[in-house]
Amino acid sequence: MKKVVVTGGGGFVGKAIVKLLLARGIETTVIGRNTYPDVIRMGATVICGDIRNADFLSSAFREHDAVFHVAAKAGIWGSFKDYYSINVQGSENVLQACRDNGIRNLVYTSTPSVVFRNHDLEGVDESVPYAENFLCHYAKTKVIAEKKILSANSEGLLTTALRPHLVWGPGDTNLIPRLVERGKKRQLKIVGTAENIVDISYIDNVAMAHLLAAENLEKTASAAGQAYFISQGEPVNLWNWINDLFSRLRLPLVSKRVGFQKAYVLGALIEKFYLLTRNQNEPPMTRFLAEQLAKSHWFSIDKARVDFGYVPQVSTAEGMERMVLWLKENGFV
């Protein structure tokens, strides 16, 4: 890799990938909807634009040799049209822009949500089939997009998909800040039995997994056409992990509980109310969120270890220390 593109390079995961690329002396172009002064200061080139614009992407990809497609519409609420246009049509445009410019290697950032069902997933590997019923547009459109990315794998364009789970660490703009904010307001309740085990993924490990996958495509290409779960490789009890964080930040521990079925039904009612009132804000509870907070979902990372040598370099304990320090230094507590 000499000159690469990172779509969504101004976001949490994208920026971490950019940082690693630049540290290795790889010329990096970030495509996003904003200018990202901090990314420019890191040494990357930023091109503002929309991945839904095929002509823009084809022009922006010119003279690059690899692409990390990280950009996506995440979250659990919003119109299907928006999710589809960004996550599916945007990915189709990325594929076409790669073909237009003879780019050979494409690493796609997917999500374990593509296999989520209404039951526990414990230690499963990549042979588990895609979900067929969806409780949020994000999961449905990521399934469609991942299938398109992997089916596009060919001699002329090698593709692979990574599925990092619950990405966290310094610089997080979503998961941890929202947890901390709700913790401050005592708005969190344990959903279910508090026994659910989940995978988590420290940001630096996720970024390294992307680089390892790209290097694999350049060399042996054993990862071509394949999807991979990425995590710490050490699943945690979700509510113990959250309370450990809160304890370190001297926030009230989460102790109040609500049963899974009650939270699920409440989520369904809130969803209907938000739809009827055309409320664009993310609901405090949805059916998808109830399942995420109550069910176990952790995955084998053996395939990533074997195929491209992924081994988490930052332990969960060290990651927690770094994140707590960052939260304190940046005024979250």
Image (tube, grey):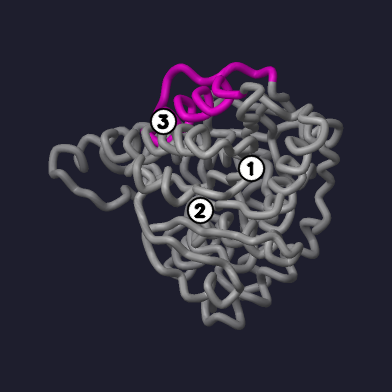
Give the CA distance from mark 3 to mark 2. Answer: 34 Å
Please say if the residues under marks 3 and 1 sit with CB atoms less than 8 Å apart: no
Magenta stretch bounds: 127-153
**Is 20 left, or right, of 315 in this rendering?**
left
Dividing the picture into quadrants, the one containing residue 326 is bottom right
- Marks 1 and 2: which is nearer the front? 1
Q: Residue 104 at x, y = what percent?
A: 63, 35
Identify the mark nearer the N-term, 3 or 1. 3
Q: Which mark is residue 141?
A: 3
Picture layout, residue 229 above or below residue 277: above
Residue indicated by mark 1:
164
Residue under circle 2? Answer: 256
Q: Is residue 248 magenta?
A: no
**Element carrying mark 3:** helix
Q: CA distance from mark 3 to mark 1?
A: 17 Å
CA distance separating discs 1 and 2: 29 Å
SS for tag 1?
A: strand
Image marks 3 and 2: residues in contact by CB distance under 8 Å: no
- Which residue is rendered at x = 76% and y = 30% of the image? 221
Q: In this view of the protein, can residue 305 be seen by the observer? A: yes
- Residue type at mark 1 is Pro
257 relative position to 208: left or right: left
